[in-house]
Amino acid sequence: MRRIHSSLAAALVMASTAIGHAQMKPRARDLGIPFDGTPGSLNAITDVAGIEVGMTTLISGSGPLKVGAGPVRTGVTAILPRGKTSKDQVFAGWFSLNGNGEMTGTTWIDEAGFLEGPILITNTHSVGVVRDASIKWSVAHGQTSQARSLPVVAEPWDGFLNDINGFHVKPEHVFAALDGARPGPVAEGNVGGGTAMSCYGFKCGTGTSSRKIDARFGGFTVGVLVQANHGARNLLRVAGVPVGQEIPQAAAALNPLMNDPARAADALGELGSIIIVVATDAPLLPHQLKRVARRATLGLARTGSVSSNGSGDIFIAFSTANAGAASAPESAQVSMLSNARIGAVFEATVQATEEAIANALVAAETMTGIDGHRVEAISHDALRQALRKYNRLTR
């Protein structure tokens, strides 16, 4: 196990390592899994020009849980719509499919239509410290646009593997994720806020994907980043194949997550959450972006989730077009994509969401956390075998 990086300098090293490691892991397409649509060059949210992503990953300790001491399996993910050097706000909209979760700052997005500053994702009990640290960072970097700051911070719960009540995420870890944010490849799996996340009974975490829209419909880009911690195992579908039912049930018996009494309390055992961030350079206004955020639901559904009572499924979408609209002193001239053309953005959102979840699943690695709790990564061979049975492999 890597040890925790508690100092700012060490956290920065961890953040940089996470980004640099992005190219080294296989992704869903590398296994021959077919997906609709054409991805961007990175097949990541950073294919939308100007976006920067940073992560801090915290992993230390093993053995019995000692609250406040560990084991620690958690982190922070930061998404900056226009990068670290810009304070220009973006139009945004959000949607809650099932609200058993948290995303701060959304009432102001509803009211004003703008997202100010970064989007951060962490674990449930670290939302407060991450929110406060985000404000401190924004003030220090001159990124605030009004006297009060209402940052967006979202969460799934990682307490099956992580000492969540030990409050191990500190302000310096948030600063490291923000300061370390950059364009380019994005790390996936057990990194950032997704470090200890699981989906469909397998190890999961951070995943990303993108789509290039045909030039006939504007040639825009849509990028998606997910923090996936949702879904009951038997529901999992990959490229339309019921993978969760095809992989032998004996494998599930080895996963204590499936026997967790807390999970059994839900009729479907779906007590996780998923946060989905959708970005585009298409010129969309806030009401249109709310429509886009809703379409992430359909990409999630393609992977099998039914968003049961225990799942916090919250999505946000923003557009990097219409620069300067928020700072206009009196009125702003803005561009809006026609509703007759927005369907292409909807389609790209659904496709990229589905693949981002699959990428999170494929990139994740088996992890052991508190009290020996262990969540197995999905076997790439078993996954390919299931898809081959249904003639769904591209190679």
Image: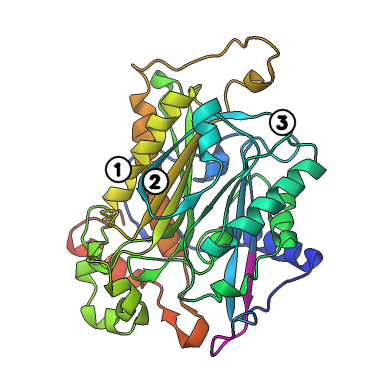
Q: Nearer the viewer, mark 1 or mark 2?
A: 1
Magenta region includes residue 63 = yes
Q: Nearer the viewer, residue 13 or 228?
A: 228
Q: Give the extent of the magenta segment.
A: 57-66
Q: Up-down: is 121 above or below 261?
A: above
Name the residue type under label 1.
Answer: Leu
Res. 28 visible in picture = no
Identify the residue under disc 1: 298
Across and down, in percent, residue 51 comes to 62, 39
Near mark 1 (Cα within 10 A), the count class, few <14, some 14-19 or many ≥20, is some
Most extreme residue toward the left, as rendered? 390
Badge 3 or badge 2: first in the primary sequence: 3
Amino acid type assigned to the residue bearing label 2 in the image: Thr
- Disc 3 is placed on an element classified as loop
Between disc 1 and disc 3, whose residue precedes?
3
Relative vertical location of residue 329 with respect to residue 208 in this rendering, above or below: above
Expressed as whole percent of the image width and height from the top left, the position of residue 36 reads 32, 42
Q: Is residue 50 above or below residue 392?
A: above
Q: Is residue 153 above or below residue 217?
A: below
Indicate the position of residue 246 as horizontal and vertical percent values.
Answer: 20, 69
Q: Which residue is mark 2?
A: 353
Q: CA distance from mark 1 to mark 3?
A: 35 Å
Question: Which secondary structure dominates the residues rendered in magenta?
Answer: loop
Task: Label 2, secondary structure: give it.
Answer: helix
Q: Earlier in the sequence, mark 1 or mark 2?
A: 1
* Residue that label 3 marks: 146
